[in-house]
Amino acid sequence: MNSKLLAALILGISIVGLSIGSTVPVIALRLYQAGASNAQIGIMSALPAAGMMLSAFLVDWLCLKLSRRQIYLLCFSLCALSIALLEIPGVGLYGLGMARIVMGLGAGLIIILGETWVNEMAEEATRGRIIAVYTTCFTVFQLIGPGLVALLGTDGPQVLAIVLAGYVLAIAVIWLTLPHQHILADHTQSKTFSVLGFIRVAPALCVGILFFAFFDTVILSLFPVYAAGHGYSIKLAALMVSIILLGDAVFQFPLGWLSDKTGRAAIYLGCGLVSLLIGLGLPLLIGYPALLWPSLVVLGAAAGGVYTLAIILIGQKFSGPDLVTANASAGLLWGIGSLLGPLLSGAAMSGGSHGLPLTLAATAAVVVLFACSLLRQHQAQQITE
């Protein structure tokens, strides 16, 4: 394995995580301070997800026209430009909206190609650990983003300047490190399924990706509201989000290591079951802080494990152009989940005080249902082999 290339890819995804984690709260708070409506803030928060969905349909075409090195340089440049546009005085809502779509488009392509590249480099015996390190770095830097906002505030350019500097560093490293030639999947080969066709080919993995995107956006946007509504202070409610993300970040490598040693489909099912049980238990746990805090750590670990195992299983099952298409479909599903999460959970919260955890439990139950089917398929394959 090319360790320098892997380090460059990890640096790139880390900067993307930092930019997502910091720009979402910066823009939301700036718009709030400027008197924007909740609808306007919500739309601006959703536009990066729309850009990511668009990237899923462009990645194959771009791979036919450009090398992955060129695509990476283009995407990081677009992301850097979108960050710089946020500091231009009088940019207006339309300009801001375009900047957010461009950000989502560039970040989506980086995520799709990065996951493909790392999966193609990883050996089967260590695939789980390699993917876990990659996803953990994204989560850790996404967690750092809100911390920067809390430390430096939103009034000045300091937060976005740090993110922009990160993109400049990433561009320099990519320029020096990534190979010029196509060393990965040959896109002249024919694909066996389309971006939308992946849903039919691997429904269990699609459900897991949808669940985690749903979970991620709901935890970031609505869980503090849920906790505050049950008597916790705003600071404690915000801290709960950090604890959930911390559980996600800390436990992905152990789960990746375990997936290399035992059955990956069984761990995938286990993560779904734990997410389901904690979701069902949150209405009770919310009244017992001593039980709630460790449960939030485990919830973050299990929900993050669903996504990590889905990406590992994609790399195990697919290769070549099909691997790119599978990851493009994952990007599309991520965008859909990110859009649906706040909408469905917000409606459920309007219908009852425990609507949020019950919605999470319902989506986790779907993961469990499909994961059971996937486990049976893997067991049947092992018997025939």
Image: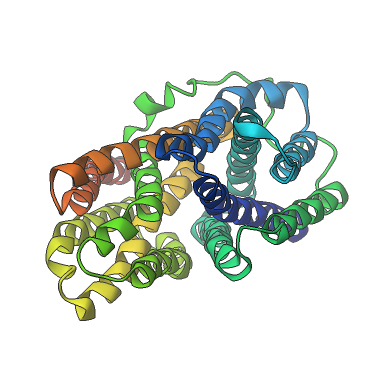
The front one of 299 and 134 is 299
In the image, residue 178 lies at what x, y percent?
80, 47
Residue 385 showing in the rendered view: no
134 over 198 or under it: above or below = below
Looking at the rendered image, the quarter that the C terminus falls into is top left
In the image, residue 44 lies at what x, y percent?
52, 37
Left or right of 284, for residue 164: right
The front one of 33 and 111 is 33
Residue at the image position 54 percent from the left and 60 percent from the top? 126
Residue at the image position 22 percent from the left and 56 percent from the top? 273
Q: Residue furthest front?
A: 35
Q: Place residue 235 in its image quadrant.
A: bottom left
374 over 64 or under it: above or below = below
Residue at the image position 71 percent from the left and 61 percent from the top? 158
Q: Residue furthest right?
A: 176
Left or right of 156, for residue 285: left
Residue 306 showing in the rendered view: yes
Residue at the image position 48 percent from the left and 21 percent from the top? 193
245 over 377 or under it: above or below = below
Q: Place residue 179 in its image quadrant.
A: top right
Q: Residue furthest bottom?
A: 290
Count of marks overlaid on the render = 0
In the image, residue 187 lies at what x, y percent?
67, 24
Looking at the rendered image, the quarter that the N terminus falls into is bottom right
Left or right of 252, for residue 190: right
Q: Place residue 42 in its image quadrant.
A: top left
